[in-house]
Image (spheres, coloured by chain):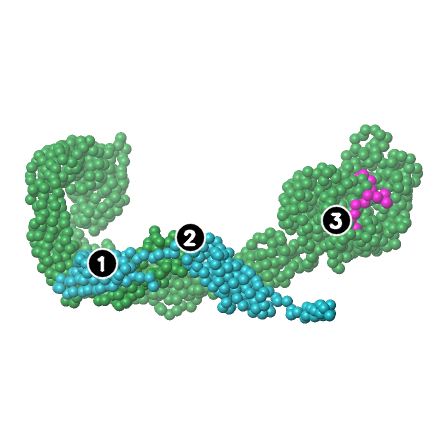
Chain colours: A cyan, B green
Amino acid sequence: MRRLAVALAFVVGCHSGGREPPPNAPPSVAASATPTTTRIGAPVAFTAVVSDPDGAIEKVVWNFGDGTGATGSQPPAFGVQHAYADPGTFTVLATAVDDRGGMATDFAIVDVLAVDGPIITLDAIELLGTLDDPAVLEVIVTVDGGPDENVAVQGGSFTKEIPVSASAPTVVEVNAEDPYGNPASVSLTITVGSP
Amino acid sequence: MKTRPACSSGGRTALFAAAALVLAAGPARGAFTRAPVGELARKADAVFQGRVERVECFWEEGVARLYTVATVRVSRSLKGTPGESVQVRASGGARDGLAMIIPGGPRFEPGMELVLFCRRSVRDNELRVLAQGAGEFVNDRGLFTRHAARGESYPEAEFIEFLERACAGEEAEPPRAIPPAPEGTRKAGPRRTSVERPKQEDPVGPRSEAEEDMPEKGSTGEAAFLGVLALIAAAAALAALRKRKAAILLLALSLGFRAHAYTRINWWGVYVWWDISGGEVDWYMRQDATGDTLRELDAVKEGFQIWEDIPTSEIGFEHLGAPAIEIDQKDFRNVIFFDSTDPWGDFDEYILALTVFWADDVTGEMLDADIKFNSVYHTFSSFGEGGTEPIEGLIHHEVGHIVGLDHTNVRTATMYYLYSPTILVLDQDDIDGATAIYPDTTPPPAPVITTNGGADFEQASQDLLLQGTMSDDTWTITVNGSAEGVAAFAPGETNWSCAARLDSSGPHTFQVVAADATGNESAPATITVTLNTPAPVATYFSVSDATTGSTELTDTILVKVDAGFEGDVTGWLVREDPTDPAPGEVQGPLPTSFVLSAGQGEHTVYFWATDALDNISTRAEASIVLDSIPPQVLRDAETVDSTHVVVRFSEAVVGADSAGAYSVSGVASVSGVQSLDADRMMLTLAGLAVGQSYTVTVSGVTDLTGENWVSPPSNEASFVAQAQDEAYLSVIRLTARWSTNVTFSEDVLGATDVMNYRVAWYTFDYPEDAPAEVNWLGGDTYELWHVDLYSPPHPYDTYLLARDITDLAGRHIHYNEPVADPQWYDGFLHVDFPVVQDYTPPSINSFGLHSLVDGDVSQTRMRLVGVRMTESDVGGGVIRWLLKEAPMLPDAAEMLLDGAERRPVLFELSAGAGAHTVYAWVMDDSYNISSAASATITLVANSAPTAVADGSPLTGLEPLDVSFTAAGSFDPDNDALFYAWDFGDGELGSGADVGHTYTQTGTFEVKLVVSDGFGAFGEDTLTVAVGSDLTPPELDVPEVTLKGRVDSALVTGVDVSGTWHDLVGGAFEATVPVADGLNQYTITADDGLGPPAVLNVTVEKQR
């Protein structure tokens, strides 16, 4: 009886082996990074172009080459973002996995430079003013309520450089008076800040 | 057109040409430099003289070959023991309607008397002629002529005598060969007489026997040979550059002077020829895979190619591959091969290669031609490497036989019967031969016109350039039947161009025809060109008064016209009629003057220009106003004497030269009028009473317009009659070295003519004189200038010659006073006058300097000092002064350079406190310079004052009264100060305190100058602003400049609200507009490595 069972199992095994589904065709993947040269802390976008001849891509597993990784599951690009903490050249592996477990891998290279991002500093604003009355020889400039400064008017125009800071708005008052006592003024409120 | 394979190997040809130059002459190729008669005699087995008795031709057993056996009755045995009758065997012959021919081989004819050099063949023990036809000498009227050599002849007696000695083994001098007879005297070659044959036309070429009878025009002598060698070398070089046509053309040009000498292969009167109506002549040669054989095949191909490349000949060849069998039999395969077996005994050491061919015995059509190289006795290779025989020259020659050419006696020809390895290019003789047999009758294709894509077109320029392409066998291009304008092109080029000039608008049709070297003309290519040249365009045009040049008004109807037109102007028309002219009316040059129609007012003159194509410009016009101002008579007439008076008009007049135009109060008639100028008339009157006043009334006189009349009250002139007098030269006075003045007693004529004066003097009894310029000084005084009266001095007999100077009445002048007997000298009035003999320098009587401010004569605080000087001169007076602080005596030029002819009253001392000595000189008009006078004055140091200006108010509405004060000014020397103000509005003022009212708005620069009276000054300025209105001033900050930094080495600039600004040293400056209200600016810096940095700046403006 046992012999029979074994023999039967063999027969069944043979039978089922002959009926296996067709082999899974592997997917293909092409990985890209944007940008490919970056700096520490700046986000890099990784996207993949994937296809599978006999099924669908389930996910792309990303290995960022710095010991971290992520899984992109959103077709079509299965993209992820990653910011590097250290400089160096990193090989990023993208492994596409299809719905039957078939896999394909591509890589992208990212150069991370040890540089800081640019920092913009606004030091000053120079006023380029005009005054149409030739009898007015100077204007008075007051910054943030400070002392009056006399600024000469030449040929109908004047300039005055105002230091500015990012911490607080700078308020500039410009006043003039013609010989007859007619006043004129203009005020500028300057605000500096990152978005 | 014959098809032409591409040149097989240009590089090879070059190497070949170079190699050929160093090759020594090798053995003969059926040719005979190396077969001199003495040597033949030594090497022959049998030499004999005899007469051909019988000629029989047989088929060779087993192969398609013929051989001929000639039976010769021996009349003189010279070597060997031939016996009374000898049979001589030779390949070739004629039988069964076929002829097998070996060019250069022996030929036999019954009755022919000859001397044969024979050798018994080891093959069949039969006698064969040594060296083929070179061993056959035929008796032609007492001359033994070498058969194959076309003319190398020996007189019979000397020839036989020499042979007897040579054959006996004696040393003997060969007889002198008689040079070939002139071409015209030689016959076409042996004619078979034993066989009756109907006379035939040359089956291919138009030429028959007549060609052989043409006299030779040129020389084939040594000089000509050397001359062409250089050209051949050049041709070989051209051949190396694949310029086959050029090479051939060069030869054709250089050798073209010579009449033909070539000979066609002639089989007993029948010319041989290939039927090429079916295309090219095919040939076969083995082509082994080894490199050597390939090179040999290439060499042979080259041999065919040079004949194929003859532009005027249509024959072509094609290599079809390897032959089935390499044998020179009639197998209708033209085989070229290296024969190392010689089964028929055709070779001996004198033979390099043989051409064996078959022809129809009756028509001469060639059926088969084979070339076999004598590999039994020689080794061959391309270029003759390693001492072997070069294939190249040989194959040229042998292919020439295939073409149908026999040997020529042109030494530079490939077909020359003597072999020369240096002849590598076809001679014109060879070309002529090939051309005669196979003339190129196919015209080239029509040329292609590429100008404007070949389509008809229009153009503006008269110059036309047609261009196009043509086939490479085009030798000439003609346009409308002429080669004029066609650019030269090298043979083989495929581009042509032709420059032409169009002489009318057309349309012009051009027919372009190509012709090949033979002269066959293509169908024409046609293009039509039409000229659309723009008409000339006027660029400037004017009408002006011919006399004054004024463009506004003229008194005369004669005006000057001027105009310029763009374009090739060939004709002009100027007239007052504005109607557009017909083409023929616009012609001739632009007139320089033009006669206006009469009538006052504006006259418009119209201009047209035309070009050579009758394109007439648009009309240009210019106007001028004809004068409407009437002439007047000047109130006072000039009295000449008791019978002449001059009436002057205000302008040139018409009618004033008529006596009827004048009436004089109290005088019956005006007996004559002489026109002195256009506006000055001298009247001759009778019956005037001296001292009496008269009035002349003028009538009927107009100005040049003809419309403005002299009319009352301006038509009267009055005069007082004067006593009869004569003009005289009243004063001659030397005023300076270079000039003298001449004054006449009254107005004269001719006094301004330089030719009417000579200033003369005697030098060693010889009169010299000098021309002078004449300056009219006004009135009746003239200055003769450029008369050198100074050097050398002329102490005596200086005189003035004057002639042709008359008073207004035409009487010649006299000297000083009316004299009865004026001195005349050669037509001149001779006037002595004294020259002031002034060698005495002037003297300075007193000289002193004084301060201009304090009168101190010894010292000053000003550098500018006054000069006091008195001087005297015994002659004409002092004319120049010079003051300077150096005591060196000046020369006259320096005195002149001193400049002003004014007496010096001021002198500026050099800088520096202390004593200054000033020296003075004066010069008189005879250039005598005084001795120096000097004066000393001390310059005391002076300090400049300081000016301090102030005023109040300095701003305000106009009119603005400002009080100025210079009270703050001061002087370190405590000198009294003088104040001068410039108020900046064009007004000046003076004084320490001064007021001024500004009546204009604006900003004014006020300048105060204070002086201390000693030449030192101080300045100060003030600004006064005068307002203009009651409204508040307009104050605004329309823009600001953002100034900042970016600290990243990777960022080169920032974007400020869409505008790029480069960083300079890491900093940026961006000027941005500021509107009322809120303004936002975004500064972006991107290093490309990640998100850009952004800084927002807002400016809120309130007014």
Q: CA distance from mark 3 to mark 2?
A: 69 Å
- Label 1 close to label 3 by CB (< 8 Å): no
Task: Determine the chain carrying the residue at label 1.
Answer: A
The answer to whether residue B858 shows anywhere in this view is yes
**Residue wearing tag 3:** B289
Name the one closer to the observer, B806 or B160: B160
Amino acid identity at mark 3 = Ala
Considering only vertical position in the picture, is B116 above or below B635?
Answer: above
Residue B444 x/y as whole percent: 65, 59
Q: Quadrant of the C terminus of chain B?
A: bottom left
Q: CA distance from mark 1 to mark 3?
A: 96 Å
Q: Can you name the residue that lies furthest to the front here?
A: A1
**Residue wearing tag 1:** A158
Residue A85 x/y as whole percent: 43, 56
SS of the residue under disc 2? loop
Amino acid identity at mark 2 = Ala
Label 2 neighbour load within 10 Å: few <14, some 14-19, many 20+:
some
Q: Quadrant of the N terminus of chain B?
A: bottom right
Residues in magenta, as a range: B335-350
Image depth: mark 1 or mark 3 in front = 1
**Residue wearing tag 2:** A114
Which disc, if any, is residue B146?
Answer: none
Q: Residue at x 48, y 62 (%)?
A: A70
